[in-house]
């Protein structure tokens, strides 16, 4: 069983996902693997047993109402036989007493019919409730596992595949539970009908029940044909979803480069493959379903044939044959019901296997239980002998190795290095998006693997490279809290965070202010504005460790300086004599204007720390850093030249990277005019 870390109801919302990251949910109690084991029959029984066990009350009522339905159907058979022998035949022969009892016979049949109607309604209501509840359980379980699995697992699985696991695979895995209560309930019908047939005539009973082995044989053949077809169809549903998701995500790229026709062809190819897979599934069902429908009719013909000889021999009466024929006719109902269950089982097993691969996926981070005291000072961060391995052609390859790093509380440290040197991987360790394969990462001398997830989420804020904005209000995007949440930051705290991120002016200009709706992924904001809004999301939590993974790439350099300087000034004593404390800041920097803002620079090269010190010290003694700085200078000159050729914008200001690379001193950002809007590079 999996329960919420804080004991709240286990409903998952996007705000839960974003607010607490991959450690929101804590597995409690012994964990049973979701995988089904054994052959097809055993796996089918496991699937059915687990589904019923998850909703026992609902399925008890569903099966009981189905059993009432089955018994009522047999009751109709007995009533018809009795009415035929005692009322219909005597009445046709002129018996006056029999004619007077016709109304009584009608009342009996009406009572049975009302019982049937009530049972059918109850069965459908409870069966529908059971299926919906099982689907909800599966979707919650899959979503919880998504939250617990590390980012490395998510990068290895396409988004469309994950969407398919939580949608079409869940529907496939639960399709069998719609007809299941009916099939189990009408077992009573088979049992009562078999007893009634045997009490009527043994030969008629053997003839009628002979269709059941034929139904089992038909199902064995069906399973062998259906399983591969259903597997192929489910896989193609995931691929179609993945292609569609990619096309939607890359809408701007597709339209700007004019590749609409290519995307249409790519999607059409997958859709056509899915069509063929679905046609194959339909062909197999088209053969199986008529066979199941045919067997009861064939049995009825055989019963009438045998019954004719038995009546002629005087062994049974006409009413007995009519009753036996009707019993076999109603036995077609459970046979069809089992046919529906057997028809859904192959697809259900395929869907559940795909879900189980997610639920049993290795790599979920262990949940710590050690509290991390929330002191007002910035966090002290240590990495001791840290190493990280990534998959390679010849086995795991080291991406980071022998990383020893100590970040003093309240310091701002810039992490620089060429692309692929491991910067993003290193900073992801601080938010525990993954664990190191070697060494330890600790905050205030507590190993992150031992820290309670809630404490880590409250004290460490990671702002990633790509700013994600939800289609919701500004307030909800900053707080990531549900309406009415008593722990949510108040509006004053939200405005303070927006001011620190230098985006408060943008929000005030929006219609509605904090209540202003933002488009999908913040489409009505510029790139720089989105990044500053995401920075405000981190700052409103007043983290002790702030990790910026190239989080200001679309922000004007002067605004970036104002943001980082504002963090320090927010810790200065106020008029009331109180003071906060500047958080420890680790920022992945690609601009020298960002580097100069740091107290210290760490140069990462080939997965190792090549050197650390101030910007001027590294320029003097680290050739690799000097070469990297020169590359940034050339890029800065290219941008300046481009602005000169295009005329620039009225509010454009020269890039300061050239000055910084020369070791110059940047004027105090407080002496400069405040820039109210971000600008995308």
Image: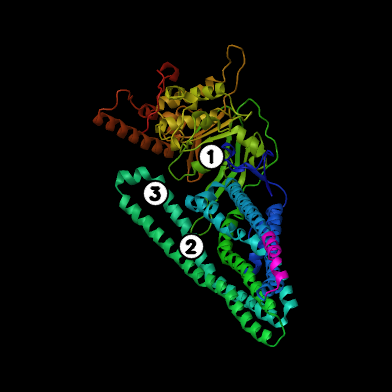
Q: Is residue 434 left or right of residue 276?
A: right
* Image depth: mark 3 or mark 1 in front: 3
Residue beneath disc 1: 427
User: Furthest-top residue in view?
Assistant: 575
Give the percent coordinates (x, y) of residue 35: 63, 60
Residue drawn at (58%, 78%) of the image: 298
Q: Main secondary structure of the magenta part?
A: helix
Relative depth, front residue between 243 and 636 = 243
Where residue 681 sits, quadrant-wise, is top left
Give the percent coordinates (x, y) of residue 297: 58, 75
Give the percent coordinates (x, y) of residue 7: 69, 39
Where residue 77 sits, quadrant-wise, is bottom right
State how far apart marks 3 and 1 are (Cα). Answer: 30 Å
* The magenta segment: 94-111
**Pointer 3 with pointer 1, Cβ within 8 A:** no
Q: Is residue 600 left or right of residue 265?
A: right
First in sequence: mark 3 vs mark 1: 3
Relative depth, front residue between 230 and 132 = 132
At label 1, counting other C-alpha atoms closer than 10 Å, the crowd grade (few under 14, some 14-19, many 20 or more) is many
Q: Give the vertical position of 472 relative to 93 (above or below).
A: above
Give the percent coordinates (x, y) of residue 600: 51, 30
State how far apart marks 1 and 2 are (Cα). Answer: 41 Å
* Image depth: mark 2 or mark 3 in front: 2
Q: Give the vertical position of 260 relative to 517 (above or below).
A: below
Query: Does residue 663 appear in this view?
Result: no
Query: Does residue 464 appear in this view?
Result: yes
Q: Give the vertical position of 590 relative to 44 (above or below).
A: above
**Pointer 1 with pointer 2, Cβ within 8 A:** no
Residue beneath disc 2: 233
Residue beneath disc 3: 247
């Amino acid at each position: 069983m999996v329960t919420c870390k804080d004991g709240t109801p286990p409903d998952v919302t996007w705000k839960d996902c974003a607010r607490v990251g991959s450690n929101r949910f804590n597995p409690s109690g012994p964990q049973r693997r979701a995988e089904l084991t054994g052959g097809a029959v055993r796996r089918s029984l496991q699937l059915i047993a687990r589904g019923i066990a998850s909703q026992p009350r609902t399925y008890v009522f569903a099966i009981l109402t189905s059993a009432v339905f089955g018994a009522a159907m047999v009751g109709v058979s007995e009533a018809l036989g009795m009415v035929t022998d005692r009322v219909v035949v005597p009445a046709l022969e002129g018996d006056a007493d029999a004619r007077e009892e016709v109304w009584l016979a009608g009342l009996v049949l009406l009572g049975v019919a009302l019982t049937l109607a009530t049972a059918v309604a109850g069965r459908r209501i409870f069966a529908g409730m059971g299926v919906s509840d099982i689907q909800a359980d599966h979707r919650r379980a899959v979503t919880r596992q998504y939250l617990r699995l590390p980012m490395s697992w998510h990068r290895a699985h396409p988004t469309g595949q994950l969407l398919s696991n939580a949608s079409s695979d869940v529907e496939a895995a639960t399709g069998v539970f719609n007809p299941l209560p009916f099939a189990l309930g009408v077992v009573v019908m088979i049992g009562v009908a078999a007893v009634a047939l045997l009490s009527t005539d043994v030969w008629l009973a053997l003839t009628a029940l002979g269709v059941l082995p034929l139904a089992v044989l038909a199902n064995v053949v069906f399973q062998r044909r259906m399983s591969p077809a259903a597997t192929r169809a489910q896989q193609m549903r995931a691929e179609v979803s993945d292609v569609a998701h990619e096309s939607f995500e890359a809408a701007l790229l597709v339209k700007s480069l004019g590749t609409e026709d290519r995307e249409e062809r790519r999607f059409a190819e997958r859709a056509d493959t899915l069509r063929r897979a679905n046609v194959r599934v339909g062909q197999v069902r088209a053969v199986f379903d008529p066979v199941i429908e045919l067997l009861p009719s064939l049995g009825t013909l055989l019963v009438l044939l045998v019954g004719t000889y038995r009546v002629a021999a005087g062994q049974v009466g006409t009413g007995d044959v009519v009753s036996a024929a009707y019993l076999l006719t109603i036995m077609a109902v459970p046979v069809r019901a089992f046919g529906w269950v057997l028809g859904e089982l192959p697809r259900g097993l395929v869907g559940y296997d795909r879900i189980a691969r997610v639920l049993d996926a290795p790599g979920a981070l262990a949940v710590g239980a050690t509290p991390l005291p929330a002191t007002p000072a910035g966090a002290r961060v240590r990495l001791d002998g840290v190493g990280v391995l990534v998959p390679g052609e010849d086995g795991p390859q080291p991406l980071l190795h022998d990383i020893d790093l100590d970040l003093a509380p309240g310091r701002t440290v810039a992490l620089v290095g060429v692309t692929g040197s491991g910067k993003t991987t290193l900073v992801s360790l601080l938010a525990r998006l993954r664990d190191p394969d070697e060494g330890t990462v600790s905050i205030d001398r507590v190993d992150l693997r031992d820290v309670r997830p809630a404490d880590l989420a409250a004290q460490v804020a990671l702002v990633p490279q790509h700013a994600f904005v939800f289609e919701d209000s500004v307030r909800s995007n900053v707080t990531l809290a549900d309406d009415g949440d008593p722990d949510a930051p108040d509006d004053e705290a939200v405005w303070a965070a927006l001011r620190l991120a230098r985006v408060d002016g943008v929000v005030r200009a929006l219609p509605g202010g904090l209540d202003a709706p933002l488009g999908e992924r913040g489409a009505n904001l510029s790139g720089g504005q989105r990044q500053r809004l995401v920075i405000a999301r981190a700052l409103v939590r007043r983290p002790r460790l702030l990790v910026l993974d190239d989080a200001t790439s679309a922000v004007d350099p002067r605004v970036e300086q104002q943001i980082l300087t504002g963090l320090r000034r927010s810790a200065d004593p106020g008029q009331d004599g109180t003071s906060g404390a500047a958080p420890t800041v680790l920022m992945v920097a690609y601009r020298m204007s960002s580097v100069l803002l740091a107290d210290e620079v760490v140069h990462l090269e080939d997965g190792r720390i090549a050197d650390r010190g101030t910007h001027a010290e590294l320029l003097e003694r680290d050739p690799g850093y000097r070469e990297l700085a020169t590359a940034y200078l050339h890029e800065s000159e290219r941008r300046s030249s481009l602005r000169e050729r295009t005329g620039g914008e009225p509010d454009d200001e020269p890039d300061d990277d050239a000055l910084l690379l020369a070791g110059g001193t940047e004027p105090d950002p407080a002496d400069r005019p405040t820039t109210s809007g971000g600008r995308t590079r």
